[in-house]
Amino acid sequence: MKKYRSGLILLVILYSAWAVSSASAHALLIRSTPAANAVLAQPPVQVEIFFSEPLEGQLSSILVFDSNNLRVDAGDVRVDPADPTRLTVTLHAITDGVYTVTWKAVSSIDGHQTTGSFPFAVGNANAEAVSAIQQKSTFRLPFSTLLSKFLMLVSLALLLGQRLFIALVWDPAVRTTSSHVAKPPAWEVFYRFGLLGILISIGIGMLAQGGQSTGSELAAPWNPELGRILIETRLGVIWLARLALAMLAVWLAGRKKSLWRDWASFAVNLALLFSVTLTSHAATEPRPFVPILGDWLHLIGMAFWLGGLIYFFTAVRQLQQLDGGVRTQLTSFLAGRFSVNAILFVGLIGLTGFYSAYLRVGSWNGLLTSLYGHTLLVKQVFVAGLLMIAATNLLVISPQLKRDRLQGIANSNVVTRFGKLLIFELTFAGLLLASVSFLTYIPPAKLASPTSDLMDKAQVDDLSVGITISPGRIGQNTFTLQLSSNGEHVHTAKEVLLRFTPDQANIAPSDLELISQGDGTFSAKGTYLSVPGAWQVQAIVRREDRFDAYANFNFTLQKPGAQNEGAATAAKQSGVLLLLTGVLCGLIALAVKARPALRFGTGIPLSLLMLGLGIFFLARPTPIEIERINPIPPDITSVAAGQALYSTNCAACHGQTGKGDGPVGVTLNPRPADLTQHAILGIHTDAQLFEWITNGFPGSRMPAFKSALSDTDRWNLVNFIRTLAPK
């Protein structure tokens, strides 16, 4: 048996080593604009990248380099508050050539970091040569993160498994016998090891999270980057919440033994387990409530199974001290109770595991060709092994023990074989938990592409009309109609229009003529959705020898979020958690039975430090950059005033039409920005344009007009610049 166990462990280690090196082949980047390896006729004004999960803006970045390895981005990397999977950066005015985009994305859900790069070209470039440049994407999998997750799951299995095993197996089995059997002393040791393991795993996890940002395995505890993560990010709040819960569990463990204390500790440990699901793949789902609940139940089932096995094994070893008849009798009751409950929890694991596999894999191809699918298959091997052992216990060992108990026979051989089988089962359970830890740190086989496209369908007489507005935001969109009649594409029409009517009475309706693409598709681009709120988009189709068809579609555009205030919110939450942790440290220091030098020399200073940090972050006025609202309506007067200011201050560089081709601008390096592209609604806010007029554009020759123009003049300039956008 030892030989087989060693072989299994070696197999898992070899597979894990191969899998970690293969993880770099999986990217979490979904799409980008410009697309990877694209050759563009006109230079873009920004780079935007969409990822599979919401991003942590404090830790994510985009850099853009030209062929001379000089940066051409403005450095204003921003997570879109209206779509936290979208990361953008503005570009300087760039010329023809090949450019390289490098990015780093840190998920705000689980803290996993991916990095990558891709090229794009502008102007007269060799498309084949550009397409041959390899797009790179790497996913770093530090050993410390795996160790932290594995240690946390094992520790929680020890903590939760004890209460579940006592309530569901031990107490009912002991009550059925007339013997007074004390709980094994090792159980108290296991519980304390579980608490210690939780604290160690939290410490390693925090340092590993900081290490992902600094590029090392573990960050130093005094590293400022680690402090930023803990105080200013959602991940930091979760880590501090875990620390506070762990300290509460330690304090409860030091209280006088009682049923209330046991169940209060169980609730705290359940909350700790729930915090694990908050950083799992389940939390990245568009509607995460049911996936998170399923993941939590899955972990509860595994905690009982692994933790219960440990306590079951030690209970059987404890029973060796009893005489043969009582030992056989109590072992029989324990085996029966545990087998029944194990089947129930295995069923829970199976159902929730199948649901999770459906969400993360989604197809047989994903199961057979992806690293996530391979690891999931290995996990099922361990599950199958555990099921076989459980079936042997239920169908073979338990009936033998029951017969011996009813006949009053002390069969020590069966009990001994049962104990050896438990060792084998514990090995499988440990490997299963290791595979679960690994699964949480690799990308799922199925990555849902985040999209905000607006889509709808309508039937008008014989005509079926489908509309798609992409990306479905305020500003420039691509409008597409799919037309079919009696199941066949409509290839030609006299005219296909879209009429845009907002619910705001002061904005007149506007029309857009769509161009046929030859396959029943008609499309065009434009900035016809200019304000948030409800819009009616009417499709008008005029055909020969047919009545005009009118299809009305109603859409609501969300207002783009204000400047991201997540860091400010996280700082306040972190302050509360630090205060709570400090109070718990103080209570533990006062309650623990230890030398005064240890209690007052370590516990009290640590408590005061936590309390001081908590008060500092709660009392500190957190700077929040509020998105300024344009106070000047873009009426005729404002636009005319802005045009006069533009001619005097801006046209020499940017040109009369804003193309960046003014007489002075053509002599500058870098060239002035093409305002016709920057002025498109949805690319930049009015506040961002106002900021650049006020303080200049980073890395360019554009001067700051803060002292030369009043606030009103600068807002008038913004209103005029908006008119330069292509219609």
Image (cartoon, rainbow, N blue to C red):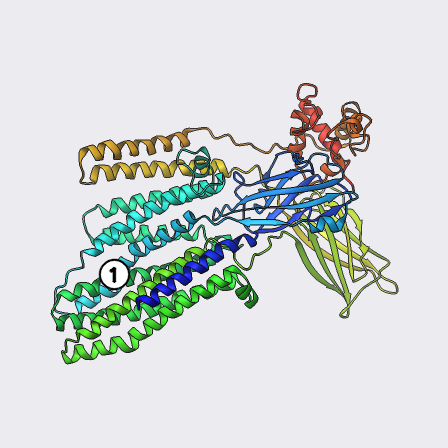
The residue that appears at 86% across and 58% down in the rendered structure is 494
The residue that appears at 18% across and 39% down in the rendered structure is 594
For label 1, the residue is 311
Residue in front for this viewpoint, 35 or 133: 133
Q: Eyeballing the image, is 511 above or below 716?
A: below
Q: Quadrant of the C terminus?
A: top right
Q: Is residue 356 visible?
A: no
Q: Eyeballing the image, is 321 above or below 109?
A: below
Residue 150 in percent (x, y) is at 38, 53
Q: Is residue 78 visible?
A: yes
In-image side of 453 versus 384 (left or right): right
Q: Quadrant of residue 481?
A: bottom right
Q: Quadrant of residue 713?
A: top right
Residue at the limit of the structure toward the top, as seen here: 707
What amino acid is labelled 1 in the image?
A: Tyr
Q: Identify the secondary structure beneath mark 1.
A: helix
